[in-house]
Amino acid sequence: MSVYIRSLKGPYDELLPFLTASIVGRSISASEEPSADVSTAAGRVAVRAFERYSWAGSNRVGMTLTAVEDGDAVHVVGITVGGSQAVFMKINTFGEDAFLETLINACAAWESKHGVLPQR
């Protein structure tokens, strides 16, 4: 399991489609799975699930993306799962790491256009 956390600046309504397109657009086997959106008095929260085939691991890997609206910031959390061929421990995380890298690259591209927030 790999985890990535980043705080981004810019419009929440533009960031989510950008991240989704960036993740799905980087792999022919990537797909967006079920999603959920919650609105509260404090802001909005989006949870997205993605899946793709990992050629390196010869298996499928999943990634969740959670985006939390916080004023002018959007806090992004990506977590990858699956991808191991072992029963009791992970012996192959290549696919997970590569899938998470699509989110990391998308966040970097977003920051190059919208600027960087100080990270907590």
Image (cartoon, rainbow, N blue to C red):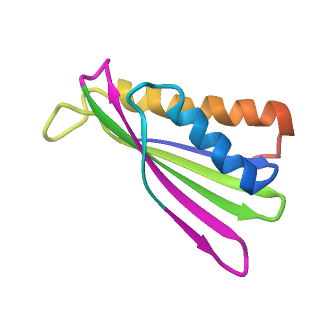
Q: Is residue 49 left or right of residue 14?
A: left
Q: Please name the residue shown 73% across and 76% down the image.
A: 42
x 46%, y 46%: residue? 79
Determine the residue positioned at 82% across, 65% down.
71
x, y percent for residue 76:
63, 51
Relative horizontal placement of residue 105, taking residue 84 as reference (left or right)? right
52 w.r.t. 45: above or below: above
- Who is closer to the viewer here, 77 or 12? 12
Q: Is residue 98 visible?
A: yes
Q: Is residue 86 left or right of residue 72?
A: left
Position in image of residue 52 (x %, y %): 37, 34
In the image: residue 31, left or right of residue 105: left
Q: Is residue 120 visible?
A: no
Q: Position of residue 102 (x, y in %)?
A: 55, 30
Residue 93 occupies quadrant: top left
Of all residues, the one furthest to the bottom in this rendering is 41
Magenta highlight: main SS: strand
Residue at the far left: name it. Answer: 87
User: Is-magenta flag for residue 41?
Assistant: yes
Residues rendered magenta in the picture: 36-58
Residue pictured at 75% horizontal, 36% vertical: 110
Residue 86 colored in magenta in the image: no
